[in-house]
Amino acid sequence: MIVRILIGLLLLTIPMMLLGQANAGDDKGICKGDMTDIGTAGDGTSCYHWEANPADPSLAGQEDMAMPMVSPMMTTTYTLTVVGENFTSKSTDDVEIKVIESVEFKEDASQDYGYDDYTNAMEHWKSVENGQSDPVTAEIMPVDAADQVYFKSTATGKVTVSPNQATATPQTVTCTGVSKGESDIQANCGEEMGMTIKTLKAASYPKKSKSVAIRLVNETNYMSTDISTAALRTYLNNTIYNQAVFEWNVTRLPTKTVNFDLNADGMLDDNSWMTAEMQVVRDSCDAAGYDHIIFLVDKPSYGGTGFMDLNQKYGFVYGDITATPNQTTAHELGHGGFGLMHTPVADGINVMHPSVGAAKIRLRKNQWDAIQN
């Protein structure tokens, strides 16, 4: 039915179907604890009534408003009933408000670069190479609200993120490095510019590299323990230093036999940097053209697994002492190559932890920065 009303010379045509028509608004998502309006502006003549399933205490006292403000604690469906003036019409409509309880960013098993959940437990760090992409996992609760989480980078000139909207949980989120710098990757509720429920901090770096030569050094009276060059190269570049977008160019030098046991005690004196015996090894086994050289030598007098002072060219790894020579080499190169100090004991899986072990493989954000700088 169409009603035409003549006002002066103006003829108004009003569709009767719009008068008293229920419009609960569009489905949307919100963060738990946030508020949102539902419905649309009233027409001034109709009667309105809302019901919530499950019951929502925040609706109390607003049941007969056209556009109440609600704050559900879980995903809720609101049903609007509208009765037209003089009971000329009655209609209903539903709107679903999905409540996002939590989003947690986590390391993705297929990542190529680094992930730091130690430095800041609430806002983790992700590293990525300029011009490259790397995945992160976003776990969203509850499952039915996953599609109401939107991802946004606050500094797209440094790092971009995709997709902008989640479709499932867990959701793979891809960070792409654009130029050196940092960005916040926000998980927002309901829309890209919505309330932020979780933040991942991302750092983009250029790929950097250094050269390191490895030389096995035997004493004239005993043989030293060797390691695999290929395995070491893979470990340094795919397990440890890739986290800081850094690569080691590893070269094997020919084995040398040197009479460095000056006091004939059957050991390499290494109780300070550098002892006379260590200097003999260095001077006899040096090679030009490398940023760093690691000497593989057995029977250290001090009993450690390796020795390389801060910001030094030369280092020693003791293959007969360490059960994890690749990890020890990575640790010593952290000292000599970048001046990295031992980490707190609490960071038990850091590669720069004072004790060695195969499980100590992490680098943290401050270490990424030190390696890059």
Image (cartoon, rainbow, N blue to C red):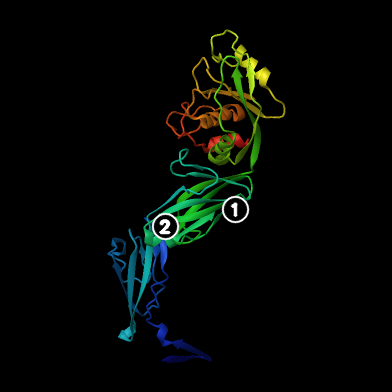
Q: Quadrant of residue 335?
A: top right
Query: Looking at the picture, which amino acid does disc 2 mark?
Result: Thr
Q: Position of residue 177 (x, y in %)?
A: 60, 49
The one nearer the camera, 245 or 11, is 245
Q: Position of residue 119 (x, y in %)?
A: 47, 38
Q: Position of residue 166 (x, y in %)?
A: 47, 60
Q: Quadrant of residue 250?
A: top right
Q: Which mark is drawn over residue 156?
A: 1
Identify the element where label 1 is drawn: loop
Q: Is residue 69 above or below residue 321?
A: below
Identify the element where label 2 is drawn: loop
Q: Residue at x 64, y 21 (%)?
A: 256
| Quadrant in the picture for the C terminus | top right
Q: Residue at x 62, y 51 (%)?
A: 157
The one nearer the camera, 3 or 179, is 179
From this viewpoint, which residue is outermost toward the top?
A: 263
The earlier-in-sequence mark between 2 and 1 is 1
Q: Residues within 10 Å of mark 1 (few under 14, many from 20)?
A: some
The one nearer the camera, 56 or 350, is 350
Residue indicated by mark 2: 169
Q: Tell whether 253 sits left or right of 161.
A: right
Q: CA distance from mark 2 to mark 1?
A: 24 Å
